[in-house]
Amino acid sequence: MEKKKLLAFFGALFLTMAMAFNPTSGIGAEKYVTYLGLEDFTGPIAGITVSFNEGLRHHINYVNDQGGVDGVKIKPILLDTRYDTSRAVSAFKRYRREHKLVFILITSTGVGKALYPLTVRDKVPIQVPGVGYFQNLLGWAITYAPPYQDMFGASMDWMVDDWKKKGNPGKPVVGYMGWDNPFGRENLLGGREYAEKIGVKLLKPEYYPVGSLKHDLWLTRLKDYGAKYIFVSGTDPENSNVVRDAYALGMMKDVQLISGVWGTTMETGVAFHPEEFEGEVICSPGIRGVDARAHPLAKLWKRYTKSKPPVQFSYMLGMSLGIMFEKALKVAVQDVGYEKLNGEAVYRALQKITGEDTKGITGPIDLSPTSRRITRDVKFYRVTGGKIVPITDWRRCPDTVSLHKW
Amino acid sequence: MRGYQRNVLGIFLAVGLIILHFTGCAGIEAKSKAQLQAIPEKTIVSPALIKKPLKFKGSGFAPKEMVVVDIALPQGMRILGLEEGENTVGVALATADSQGNFEAAMAPLATMQTLLQVPWVLRKTGVKPDFKNAKPFPPGVYTILATGMDSEIQASSNLTILAPPKKK
């Protein structure tokens, strides 16, 4: 009898220990999924990504504070990979076996392309910058803004409308300035073809090194070739220097400057150069400037942090990613239940939230079996009296990705 | 021990071992024949490494797989960008050739941000590296690890960081 008890005791102890050391046992644990973010808070694009991350993190906190999504909480592991691909790959290696890792946000195009085959093998969807390559691929990667080239196409549509509104004949001559790297060149992979399609004369693009302090040479060359509009693809506050130089050259009166998604914000560019930026137009995939500051969810940062106020546009855009994920997670939980919840279920669910809203932060969600664009809409803003104010409602971007031969 | 007692004990042990196996806690890792070497194996950390970077050479990995090289940090060492509890940092990346060999050099950004520990500051002209407040890796012997991202084969070696010569 004693032997029996001893055997039962050791047996139970052995099983308990085995279960206790199992990180996925779920015994006594709450239901949760893991959301991994491989982001860049401290590298060269930190001016926008810190607030972007805060918006996402605060929305996840907010969802968890409300009890999660149908009782399933979200565990955010949001890391600073410092714009360094080797750090990001190493971090992915470290966290790829996390409990119910169902989604990965990646803020660098290079990292997204490097990790894509591995995440597909793991069956975990990823969200990446707006590169047309992933829309064309129609795979496990979705973009967190419309593809850059689509937004450049929408900007050219706006330029044509503005040109006509001013009583000018024909189509305007357009110049393009961008960083001399894949991000700077991305706009033209489809954007160039779209210019041709709508009859806009797009001048030879001017690429400049990241970190350039003077841009007179490239600006002057575009003006001399007859540019009436110049699209500046850069990241605030780096692109501030381009606008500052255009102002110093006296170009702001004759040439309309337009910056892209990561361009001018009220907290950096406009705050640093209010006079120089006056009149600049921004093509934005999310609410910006006065719109972003007035949004009710903009106040969440006060609830979750004591840090200084964020770059409001990035903060709200980050939040829209959290809203999108919340919606997809809800569909996935309803479709397969918690036990079977995995990356594949979230991937399928992402394609079912077509047309859902992000509480007015962006246009409607566009994700579907044939779209990996989070949204297809942009809004145009203008710097007016030291503020960024809307000048259009949401406008649909043209599909320029399909025009390019990938 | 009676027969049924042995059976009960056997069932418990078998179930426990199965659980341990599936939870990855078995602590049994196949020893691979993979090799790793830092080139050079001893170095002084200075901005010169941005132009002439540290390299890594390895063999024994799966053909055509991605290999990531990490530096393991000594206990208590904290570096920018790593969360508490994280004790390895990726420094180089390569794709193995058809024989499973690879060579990887540290990218300028990795050298600057990891070995030199250069922070970034927001200035009016943009986000800029702040070399004045760099905190380079202290001298010592560091373990380096190479991991195959498909095969999960690992190799390790040492990298010695030497103290810079004293200024006269």
Image (tube, helix red, strand yellow):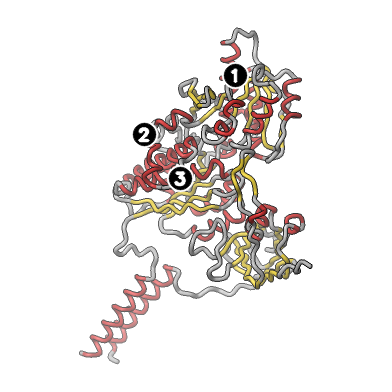
Residue A128 at what x, y percent from top left?
53, 43
Q: Which residue is outermost to the left?
A: A1
Residue A13 at what x, y percent from top left?
31, 78
Q: Is mark 3 on a helix, strand or loop?
A: helix
Q: Residue A159 carries which label?
A: 1
Chain of residue at mark 3: A
Q: Which residue is drawn at 73% across and 66% down?
A: B44
Q: Earlier in the sequence, mark 2 or mark 1?
A: 1
Q: Is mark 2 on a helix, strand or loop?
A: helix
Q: Residue A54 carries which label?
A: 3
Are tags 1 and 3 found on a single chain? yes
The reply, left or right, for residue A212 in relation to residue A95 is right
Q: Name the residue under label 2.
A: A296
* Camera-nearest residue between A70 and A166: A166
Chain of residue at mark 1: A
Look at the image and tell me in which quarter the N terminus of chain A lies.
bottom left
Do the CB atoms of the residues marked 2 and 3 lie less than 8 Å apart? no
Alpha carbon of mark 2 to alpha carbon of mark 3: how far?
A: 16 Å
Tell me the amino acid under the disc marked 1: Met
Residue A243 at what x, y percent from top left?
64, 28
The reply, left or right, for residue A282 in relation to residue A405 is left
Q: Is residue A140 visible?
A: no
